[in-house]
Image: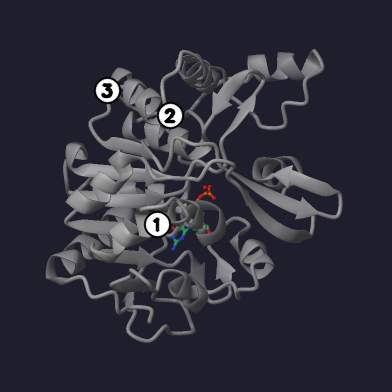
Amino acid sequence: MITFLSGGTGTPKLVRGARRHIPDHQISVIVNTAEDLWISGNHLSPDIDTLLYLFSGKLNTDTWWGIRGDSFHTHEEVKRLGIDEYIGIGDSDRALHIVRGELLRQGYSLTEATRILSSRMGIDASILPMTDEEVATLIRTGEGTIHFQEYWVKHRGTLPIQEVIRYAPTGPFASAEVINAIGRADLVIIGPSNPITSILPILECSGVVPALMDAFVIAVSPFIGDAPVSGPAAALMKARGLSPDSASTCSLYRDFCDLFVQDIRDPVPVPGSLRYDTLMIDPEKSAALAGALIEAGKKGKAGNTACS
Ligand code: GDP
């Protein structure tokens, strides 16, 4: 079994490739929930949604969010009627948010709600929210402290970041399912997701890092040189006092990382790293990278030496 730690773009591209090599029921994906929010009365979980749509074959892989070919009539009407719905939510996409909101209001945990939705969508993989507790990534800017989605989607990442804040009033604790998925895995893969907003929130859930130390873990860099392949990771790394590159990413994972993977184009080598073409511009590239990682995983033994 392979267990991934995932955000909503880089790692899902790798999961797409892994599905060419192993059946879905042998894949678990532990998913960041620090970007979740209630919006227009319904529950948006952006990274979980991407995985649900990926595994059910509906994902819009031009954007890596939402449903391919979705319409936006409700979104336009909601805005016309005066709600500042700053995230474009498709009509079919909204149906998922409505049902999840209802399940949560009925008292189901996020883990249970995701399992129910996965089953109704015919998904065999285990999609596991990192925690059932409330967690949010907030961004302190000169104009106040705002939710990460507001920073990235509403303001298009243009506001200077003063601080990245993780709001987690009750923990957070990893769910038992998450710890079990790491413990049972033959290989754990941290895909090329944003270290600050996608992977650190998972690592901050208590129980995750000790479990990873006992597992065989391969991590893939989302940076080539001093720039991410896409998204705001550079500004977020700098806000945490880190340089936006593979070496800093590796250092964040040093306590548990057994193999670190950098792109073949990255001009600044991290000692001991494996070099692959990590630019997953199509399903074949995703499959090739996933296949290489699976092969590397078969040879490896946990020693946590890659980034130390
Ligand atoms: P988010 O939740 O949408 O922010 O998505 P993730 O955190 O899962 O992924 C965002 C990160 O993926 C960015 O930092 C990108 O640099 C990285 N990324 C996206 N596509 C690729 C790719 O094909 N290869 C690599 N190496 N990184 C990628």
Towards the viewer: 88 or 301: 301
Name the spot of residue 153 as percent of width and height, x first: 68, 42
The residue where tag 2 is placed is 110
Q: Is mark 1 on a helix, strand or loop?
A: loop
Residue under the image location 48 percent in, 28 percent down:
67
- The one nearer the camera, 72 or 23, is 23
Image location (x, y in percent) of residue 45: 51, 33
- The vertical placement of 267 against 101, above or below, is below
What residue is shown at x 65% (from left), y 29% (from top)? 88
- Front-lying residue, 144 or 274: 144
Q: Nearer the viewer, mark 1 or mark 3?
A: 3
Residue depicted at 36% across the width and 54% down the height: 208
Task: Give the residue type at disc 3.
Answer: Gly
- Ranked by sequence position, the earlier of labels 2 and 3 is 2
* Mark 2 residue type: Leu
The answer to which image quadrant residue 146 occupies is top right
Q: According to the image, label 1 marks what residue? A: 280
Closest to the camera, between mark 2 and mark 3, is 2
Q: Where is residue 180 in the image (x, y as percent from the top left)?
A: 24, 45
Q: In which quarter of the image is the C terminus?
A: bottom left
Q: Which residue lies furthest to the left in this view?
A: 299
Rendering coords of residue 267 (x, y %): 49, 83
> Ligand 1 near label 1 (Cβ, under 8 Å)?
yes
Q: Is mark 3 on a helix, strand or loop?
A: loop
In the rendered view, would you say 133 is above or below 277?
above
Asked whether residue 157 is in view, the answer is: no
The mark found on residue 175 in the picture is none
